[in-house]
Amino acid sequence: MTVYILCFALLLVGIYGVLTKRDLIKIILSLGIMGYAVNLMIILFAYKKGAGFAIMLRDGINTNMVDPLPQALILTSIVIELGITAMLVALAIRLFQKYKTFDITKIRRLSG
Amino acid sequence: MILPFLIIIPLLAAFLISLISGEKDNWAIVLSILAVISLLALAIFSFFTTGNKTFVYEMSGWKIPLTICLVQDALSSFMLVIVNLIALTSLMFSVTYIRQHDSPWKYYALFMLLITGMNGVIATGDIFNLYVFMEIALFAAYALVAFGGKAEEYEASFKYAAMGSISSTLILLGVGILYASTSTLTMANIAAELQTKNPMVMYWVAAIFMAGFGLKSAIMPFHAWLPDAHSSAPAPISSMLSGVLIKALGIYAIIRIFYNIFGAPQIFLTIFMVLGSISIIVASYLAMGQWDLKRLLAYSSISQIGFILLGLGIGTKLAILGAVFHILNHAIFKSLLFYNAGAVEMALGTRDLRKMGNLRGAMPVTSGTSMIASLSVAGLPPFNGFFSKLIIIIAAVQSNNIIYAIIAVIGSLLTLAYFMKVQRYGFNGENKITELNQSISLGMKSAMIILAVLCVVASILIIPGIREVTLNPVVSVIMNKTAYIQSVIGR
């Protein structure tokens, strides 16, 4: 149970960073932390104490194994997050070229 | 089977466009228009052959709990028709519009990727696959919002991408919890498993999904990114985002998950009604204060999404009919209004209503179609918007939700007020405008005329004989809570 709570705390750290930080790069890093927290949580759902890897052995199937599907899901999700992070960093570079700052309180030409 | 082609064709077109395009965008235009025409033909064919049936496609020969499946029922083929119809007109509009920017072929490749994502979200029957296709569509959308390359566009795109990442992370968390409690990812199996589990699991996951998909569909407390993103994007992309993206990724996913998987728990229907009515009133009020035409239209989108959500929340058969019909109508008239805004921006170089003027002489097609679209969104007969709003209001009265009916009527009147403002200042104003910076091309005009005609023609879908074959199957997919499980698993 403790690991799930710690995982949720990591998610909250990410949300806190996104909501309160004023630097574009710190916001991107916080979004990354949120993503890691969720990935870690889904891996934990599949974890089973003392279980082995989920592949065929030479002398038959390993009967006590972890669930391999979440690991496949997380690989997909890591690739997606890589793409989104690259996109966000590219946008941050362009924003820096235009505004000469990473401070979001100074990047305010659009009125909310 | 049609459904795999609706994903393969645009993906292949995106790949080929980036492979063969050089400096000129001629091949990109030909390829993308061919792809979208074939998609629209396939979508219309699937809509008229589906009826009340459900077809399931299981990928690579595996059987259902193991495979990724695509599900084609009345709701998904209805949404596919809307997406591909708006995509076709949007491409017709883009041909000359997007030549203002550098390297237009990139635009077409990204556009095809956007359609791939939306078609995938609508077609899939697997909840993790829904997340993946949603990310594909959003990735293309972030890039397309920033396509113009101005400072404001990067700013809007960053805001959109940050909010989009938060909502995607929440949705992934919800998918993970669903998998942990049901050990399956196929939506129908999840729905069947959840009936035997503790309902608290469902409420927790539904709350997470409410926040995630609420951000995607820009319901009122989650709306902050929409006015920036939709007003900064190029006009044809604004129409794709406002017209179909928030419906495919937001409203469609909400319908699928809350109605077909969770079986429409009453507490969430109440939340839909409350959030919907807040969206209607507050967004209409905010729209009234705007002088930027595209920003006004973006706020108007939030308020019209509120009408759809209110209809879904009331949850009677009539209300769902109104909501489904309003999804189609809003896609048509909001796309048309964004084309009008794009045409005016191209011809006059401004989006400010105070700098526009009397355009009836100089731009007859644009001002004429904008009049039709304004009357339609404001809900005046005989245009399509009138019927869907009327149905939602009647359904609210019939189900004893008089307060919500009054809110819908007030929202409708406020909509009329701010579109009067658009017409009064923007298209029939005082300063006479005779010469234009750029003329409006034939493609742009025909895109506007097609949608203006559809604004009138779509009204016939409500006539009883036609309603039975078009809208009623969609409503029965949403209303029958166990039918989705039966039709996918128990074949």
Image: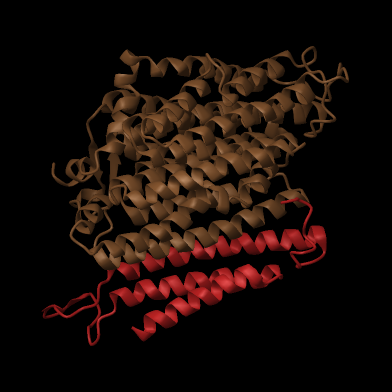
Identify which residue is drawn at 40% across, 24% down. B41
**Closer to us: B491 or B356:** B356
Which of the chains is brown? Answer: B
Quadrant in which the N terminus of chain A appears:
bottom left
Q: Is residue B84 left or right of residue B447?
A: left
Q: Percent position (x, y) of residue A55? A: 22, 75
Residue found at the far left of this picture: A59
Report the residue at 68% width, 28% height from top.
B417
Residue B171 placement, left or right of B103: left
Q: Quadrant of residue B210?
A: bottom left
Spot occupied by residue B467 in the image (x, y as percentages of width and height): 34, 19
Across and down, in percent, residue B20 comes to 56, 40
x, y (%) of residue A18? 61, 69
Is B189 above or below relative to B234? below
Chain shown red: that is: A
Q: Residue at x 70, y 44 (%)?
A: B232
Near-viewer residue (B487 or B430): B430
Q: Is residue B225 above or below residue A9?
A: above
Q: Can residue B14 be spotted in the picture?
A: no
The image quadrant that residue B165 belongs to is bottom right
Q: Is residue B442 visible?
A: yes
Left or right, B265 with reference to B373: left
Identity of the residue furthest to the bottom in this view: A50
Residue B410 vs residue B322: left or right? right
Quadrant of the image occupied by residue B92? top right
